Amino acid sequence: MSRKSKKTEGTSFIFQDLSGKRWSTIRIATIIFMIFTVVVSSVIGVSLFKNPNLAALELEEESNITSINESITSSSEDSFQVSLNNQNAVSEVSEDEIYAFYQKDDDTSKSSLVENIESLGVVIPDWYNLTSNQTITKSIEDEIDALAKKNNVKVIPRLSLESASDQETLHELLHSSKSRTAFINSLYEQVKEDKYAGINIDFTGLNEDDRQLFTTFMSELYDLFYSHNLQVILTVPPDDGAYDYSSLSETVDRMILMLFDEHYEASEPGSVASANWSQQILDEFPVSSDKLIVSLANFGYDWTVDSEKQGEYLTYSEIMEKVSESDLKVQWDQDSRTPYVRYTEDYQEHIIWFLDAVTSYNQLKLAMEHGIKGVAIQNLGYEESSFWDILDDTTSIEDNVSELKTIENVTPIQFTGDGDIIKISSDSEEGLRSLKLDREGLISLETYKKYPVPYYIERFGGTESKKVALTFDDGPDPTFTPQILDILSEKNVKGTFFVLGKQAALYPEVVERIYREGHTIGSHTFSHSDITEDSSLTLKAELNSTQRLIEQITGHSTNLLRPPYTTDADYSVDELSSVFEFQEMGYTMVGSLIDSRDWESESSDEIVKRVTETNLGNGNIILLHDAGGDRSTTTEALPEIIDTLREKGYTFVTPNELIGKDRNDVMPTVEESSNLYMVFYKIADTVYIFLSKFGTLFFTLAIIIGITRLLFLVFFSFKHKKNYKNRQRKEGFNPSVSVILPAYNEENVIENTIHSILKSDYSNFDLIVVDDGSTDQTAKIVSDRFQHDERVSLITKQNGGKSSAINRGFNESNGEIIVIFDADTSIAHNAISLLVDNFSDEQIAAVAGNVKIGNVRNLLTLWQHVEYVTGCNLERRSFDELNCITVVPGAIGAWRKKAVVEVGYFEDDTLAEDTDVTLKLLRKGYQITYEPNAYAYTEAPENLKSFIKQRVRWSYGILQCLWKHRGALFNPKQKTLGFVGLPNMWLQYVLQALAPLADLIFVVGLFGDTTKILTFYVGFLVVDLLASLYSFRLEKANVKPLLLLFVQRIVYRYFLTYTVWKSIISAFKGILVGWNKLKRSGNVKLPDKEIEKGA
């Protein structure tokens, strides 16, 4: 019969419930709670991904543009004829002869340069300018300079006029020989100093009267630069009488011909570079082909037909924006082989002639037929990216013509309008066109099938009048938000608060006050999430949870949203894809170009200055924060900001007023269909507030108590060490001792244990082995091996449990002192002597020995070793000083027999009989002490299954003892036991059970006050490590196992948490946890050299 069944049938035990009513009641309550939790969680979960019915704000202005789809010619025949058999034709353009005009401080130009740098030979940045006083100013971008040099691309800066009005300066410079010489020398020194490969001269708009002088200037410049091995490149327009092309060709290394502007702003409407015109220019251009570079561009002009108004310059992206937004039609002109668009606006006819990658392809092929040396991209960054696929391999460019069919966005983001309220009018899409080639490999027909659509960002809310809006992010905060509301109320100003869902859930009363006092509320996501990192589902959950909370608290929804980290004007494609997604949910984005940066400001004056001076005029919306840290400087600055701006003539409005909307437009009343969600959100919010506040309090107290406890243990263990050295030993004290060894199925270890006991240096003892109904060879081994040793006696009995075995030994013993060992434990030769020495003091009823792990063989046993050293033994040293040791371990403990008899022996109503009898002795007024040098080496479980079995039994037994002796808790009669020993046991039990909650709070806390949480946690770990090092030093143990202390404190702790909860559930059920006899390995080994007295 097993110990479990024997126990159940024969006796009652703590937590026993034969009726089973307790567990039934708990189970029913648990099921009801789980159903309630599942229902609430399900409704909340559904609401996270079911978008509220938000009506998007109407911001667009009606378009008055209408497409004209009729062609400008009635003939569809191709009038362009060419025969590509020029003997000067080149088969390819060298990479070294591909040039690009980089535009300074232009992000679009920079992006293209970075992407295509490996395809370039020369970059020409517009970094040098001729000023009105005939000097050179420069604005070099080090980053671009370094990029070019890193990729072995030549940098030849462009020298141009600083402004169109400087034509007179150029005229005066050219007419003075002295001025020319001085300027040329200065230019040379500048290029030499900057270590560039040469200079590009681009004096567009040259006066025809200066034709000869300009040639002279170029000749003098070339002589100097050529003599120092520096290149001279001249950029010229086609067919311009101001340039003596033939003579100039002798004064340059390369001449860049801008192959466009057949028609331009001031001319009548027409093709910007027709095929016939391009062919004619190349045929007649009087410059040797080995110096000729053709510059190509993608842009156009928008002319008002039959009007004296000049045409408007448009980039290719702007043209695509106009045709896609207004649903216009791009047509192909067969005569010029260039595209155009016709439309009417305000009853006036317009026509746009433009150049794209297709026209650049045709021009390149014609230019290569004329033997050109190279090609240049005129406005880098504003070309179609597909043209680079042509340039990458010019050996047979018609083979790559299919790359032109896909039209990528030249600029992925386009801005229109003014203001801080943002709307994306379209999602980003690539365009598509079909192409037809003639027999010469030129494109004879281009048809746009789909237009490329970038992210069009429309700005609203901009105003000429002095209106500004105050907005506050990251709240509400229970301290600073009410202070800000008080200031706004005093100053009669309405603000807009972009609240975080997690903060609104914690402080609903503050949100309610914001709305009640007439302010506007917007969403700032739930957790201050970075929308560029969020998935679609996460974004929905962030926004919908915050929206539902605002609805539940105020009864109104909100259309306004300010995503974290996106208040400035620089939006990435990743940001805009998320913005477009939440815009589809009905939100309107509110940015802010007047950023106070109060979160990093050290003084209120700094905030005031940044708002009222530095950034004022950038926009209309001011960004401040009412939470997320100490906002005292913000509250100090706010009244001064309001007063200062009013003195400057500004009035305060809300963002919705900037776009002509009132608060009801952006915060409409919640629809009845959302009432169900509001009820459940109220329930969830109440629970969230409780758990958040309780959890934070619990985590903080747990860390503080943990640190305090460790310091307490270190202090008293140090005191114990000092007092132990002075402990008095009574000479000649040699009482009779009976050693009791209870055993059940211990055949693998019993012999070694007995041998270690018989080697004891204490002489006056006998050994009683109590075999508790073993079913193996335990009794036979004892009888056969030790029958001739008169110190050893064997008692066999029916299985009745460890307590009954110990009590049987007590009754059969003759010793005054009883020493009990576990059957799997080997002892040091002086252990019994050291234990017995302490009984010279009559008040001492029991002595706890020092238990060590004797089979440290793997990670699990190593962690148990660390636990014993840093936990059990350190605690016993400390509690010895206060006489509140709560357990004399069964592995090694000595007992005064009469005291144990007095308290009723070892009872079997708990599984922790050693803890139970220890507590009974303490409650009786006896003293329990600790003998740190009485070593016992016990066998620890070597696998997880055995470990869990053992610890469930221990946890259940300790819980039984805590409940049994609950009357001693905080009992003034019990002193240190009631106020130190038992509270410590309860604390360890509760903290162990709630360890997952502490970890969850820690992780969640990292998203809030990270610094505070980490400070507490790291502080605890440091104190824990120092206390552990101290414990190992006390035990004179190798500290190497502490290298894994952090891992042990996490992983090992969860093993213990599992055992605690399993024991709690068993207690609820009212059943007894079985002994679950562990299989012994017999791997316990005594150390080669035992540690002597002197702990």
Image (tube, rainbow, N blue to C red):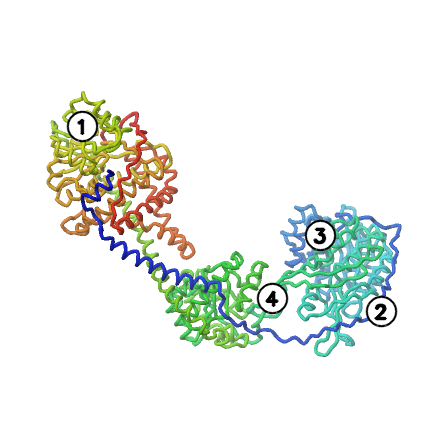
Q: In this view, does 562 lie to the left or right of 91?
A: left
> In front: 813, or 1050?
813
Q: Which residue is drawn at 15% across and 27% down?
A: 765
Q: Position of residue 753 (x, y in %)?
A: 25, 28
Instruction: State the image quarter where residue 438 is shown.
Output: bottom right
Q: Around disc 4, counting alpha carbons within 10 Å, would you say few (fewer than 14), some (14 to 19), or many (20 or more)?
A: many
Q: Is residue 658 visible?
A: yes
Image quarter of the C terminus: top left
For mark 2, does the 10 Å Cα neighbourhood hold few (<14), some (14 to 19), or many (20 or more) residues? few
Q: Where is residue 415 in the image (x, y as percent from the top left)?
A: 62, 66
Q: How far apart are marks 2 and 1 (CA)?
A: 123 Å
Would residue 186 be visible to someone looking at this image? no
Q: Dividing the picture into quarters, in which one does residue 403 lie?
A: bottom right
Label 4 or label 3, whichever comes before in sequence order: 3
Badge 2 element = loop
Q: Residues within 10 Å of mark 3 (few under 14, many from 20)?
A: many
Distance between the alpha carbons at the discs numbered 4 and 3: 31 Å
Circles 3 and 2, Cβ within 8 Å, touching? The answer is no
| Type of the residue with mark 1 | Leu
Q: Which of the labelled discs sits on residue 123, or is there none?
A: 3
Residue at 41 percent of width and 57 percent of height: 1008
Of callouts 3 and 2, which one flags the residue occurring earlier in the amino acid sequence? 2
- Label 1 sits on residue: 794
Residue topped by disc 4: 457
For marks 2 and 1 on the same chain, the one whose residue lies earlier in the sequence = 2
